[in-house]
Amino acid sequence: QVLSGCAIIVRGQPRGGPPPERQINLSNIRAGNLARRGAPGQPDAKDTPDEPWGFPAREFLRKKLIGKEVCFTVEYKTPQGREYGMVYLGKDTSGENIAESLVAEGLASRREGIRANNPEQSRLAELEEQAKSAKKGMWSEGTGSHTVRDLKYSIENPRHFVDSLHQKPVNAIIEHVRDGSVVRALLLPDYYLVTVMLSGIKCPTFKREADAPEVPEPFAAEAKFFTESRLLQRDVQIVLESCHNQNILGTILHPARLGVPSDPRASSPLEQNGNITELLLKEGFARCVDWSIAVYTRGADKLRAAERFAKERKLRIWRDYVAPTANLDQKDKQFVAKVMQVLNADAIVVKLNSGDHKTIHLSSIRPPRLEGDSAQDKNRKLRPLYDIPYMFEAREFLRKKLIGKKVNVSVDYIRPASSATETVPAFSERTCATVSIGGINIAEALVSKGLATVLRYRQDDDQRSAHYDELLAAEAR
């Protein structure tokens, strides 16, 4: 990371986890300070703007150094622990001297009061005189006010702002990574500083409590480092997709990894670039979240597939994962059967090839019911179909579509039997599946006709339809 025109953060190679950070301040030179926000919670605190040529100096270093290998020497350390030294591009001190390059471009000046009594300081003095003669950077005519950004720290109407961009990729610089799936980005060319949450996913976070140190959830530090090492202070494009409770949701497109060429057949920028959202899922650093997955530009199926890849390999956050149908043989997971009876709007009886009959419940949907009539109420009375609005229509829809027909059954999960309590009736074991005929998902057809609703789950509940996102989309229509 480049903190300013004369301070950088370096890290070693990761070994078994994120490597420690170290700040190096460039000796003997001074560059303009960058803008700072006033301290929150202090009414008298004011925002400080960029000093002239401060941002160009930062950008010069950012483009030259981010992601590159550098060599540094420490000349001295203050009592407060700040380290000052020289930074060179490459593996040793024969590389480009970064402080000299800044001074030569007129983006930094020699610190006053330092006597040129050694070769390094004499060289800085010589380069500064050359920059002055050539009127480079801060030595050019004028005040340098054109280099001061008009930073916008907040957006009055985030939803209108997002809608106005029509999901076109916006150039940006990632300025801060809060956790693996939340970043602070500087949108160009208008300098909006916005927080962006990655659409459709969530990484482990850092628990923050008053007067207590941050406590990372398992794999939170690793997920943050994964995103930082790829995105922090990189030039990216962001597709701003939606707005939720004043939070902006988006997808970040970054240059494809070195040595991995872009696919010439890709039809959109989303396919030509690296996509941190899918990478985080595939590496087991994130899970899909239902509340924002529908706005993901490439489609929820891409995210579910990436998550499934990590689950099957038990990567990181999925190290203890057990599939809902892990104990079923393949022949019991997917089969063709004949529909013999429609029990109600979400349950049918099918005849297997063996001649046995089996009750199948449609995954992740709820049939019509009276308002205030809870399925968990032990004392509720069974009502005739025609007493419940649309229940008869829903059952008739299934009867006319399915009776006597062969259907494809794909088991999504087995809901275990539960014993009765004071308030909840007993339930026998239920086989919940996706039932399709002629390529049509019957549950989705019911939902799209308004004859069933989609169940909502806890985020960590895996017992759901394999086509859950399609069900949600059908309900939204």
Image (spheres, grey):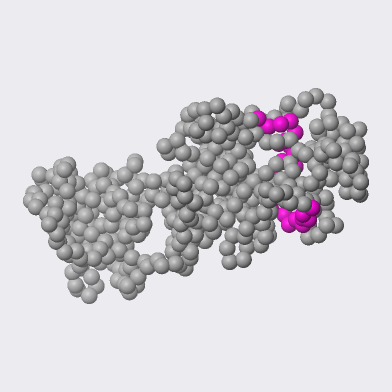
Image position, residue 199 (x, y; %): 47, 46
Residue lying furthest top: 142
Asked where in the image residue 62 lies, by quadrant, the reply is: top right
**Residue sitting at x 10%, y 45%:** 386
**Residue sitting at x 55%, y 27%:** 44
**Residue sitting at x 34%, y 42%:** 476
Image: 335 above or below 397: below
Image position, residue 12 (x, y; %): 67, 60
Image: 158 above or below 357: above
Image position, residue 263 (x, y; %): 62, 55
Horizontally, residue 133 falls left or right of residue 164, namely right
* Foreground residue among 293 and 112: 112
Horizontally, residue 68 falls left or right of residue 311, namely right
Quarter of the rendering occupied by the C terminus: top left
* Foreground residue among 230 and 302: 230
Asked where in the image residue 129 lies, by quadrant, the reply is: top right
Magenta stretch encompasses residue 57? yes
Count the numbered circles shown.
0
* Foreground residue among 213 and 355: 213
Q: Which residues are magenta?
A: 49-75
Image: 291 above or below 331: above
